[in-house]
Image (tube, rainbow, N blue to C red):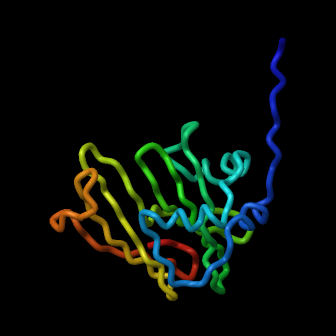
Amino acid sequence: MEKIPVLLPKHTFAEFVAKFPAVTMPVTLGEDTHFIFSAENDILPEPMIEQFILPLDPDGADEFTEYLPCFGIEFEAPFLALVWWKAGLLNYEYHLATFTPTGQLIGRKVIAFTRGEGEALRRAVCTIDEDLVIFVAEGASKAGDDYMDPTTSKMYEYEIMSNGDIV
């Protein structure tokens, strides 16, 4: 019996953006923050992931990877800023992406994460403030240990510029 190809429906960019509730800053993203978003937001449907997220994800995804819309940043600007959580095998990341109103990508960064690296866990948490500055604290700990090794810690920041660039 011949398989009939399944055509996935096309979604509009507005439908995709509607999955991301707008929130005002400041917001802090940490290792367990996704539980809050998963209680409020649904996992993105596969056709939306294929249409809007996978083309932006250089690491790709496998059958176990999930994407959860977290929020859209509420502010007045000529662009949109969306944050989603990517859950893979021993790799959890918060992605920030900025878009033109028509859906063209302006910029994308991983702004917080938890990653298994051998016997260690590398973590980064961030806070996005009212001025769209993203403060990141990153460090590592031994697997099963909640305490960061201060010798592995570093802090840095990004900023969402008025044109949507993330620098």
- Report whether residue 165 is seen: yes
Q: Work out which quarter of the rendered image holds the C terminus and state it.
A: bottom left
**Relative to 120, does residue 37 appear above or below in the rendering?**
below
Q: Residue at x 23, y 64 (%)?
A: 148
Residue 107: in sight, yes or no?
Answer: no
Q: Nearer the viewer, residue 75 or 36?
A: 36
Q: Position of residue 156 (x, y in %)?
A: 32, 74
Residue 42: percent from the left, percent from the top?
A: 68, 58
Q: Position of residue 76 (x, y in %)?
A: 66, 86
The answer to which image quadrant residue 123 occupies is bottom left
Where is 1 relative to 105, above or below?
above
Query: Is 115 or 97 nearer to us in this picture?
Result: 115
Quadrant hosting residue 92: bottom left
The residue shown at (57%, 75%) is: 164
Percent of width and height locating residue 64: 55, 40
* Badge count: 0
Q: Is residue 91 left or right of residue 11?
A: left
Kindly give the residue lying farthest to the top in the view shown.
Answer: 1
Residue drawn at 18 percent across, 68 percent down: 150
Residue pictured at 67% horizontal, 68% vertical: 20
Vertical side of 27 occupied by 105: above or below: above
Dividing the image into 4 quarters, which one contains the N terminus?
top right
In the shown orientation, is residue 51 left or right of residue 56?
Answer: right
Residue farthest to the left, as pictured:
151
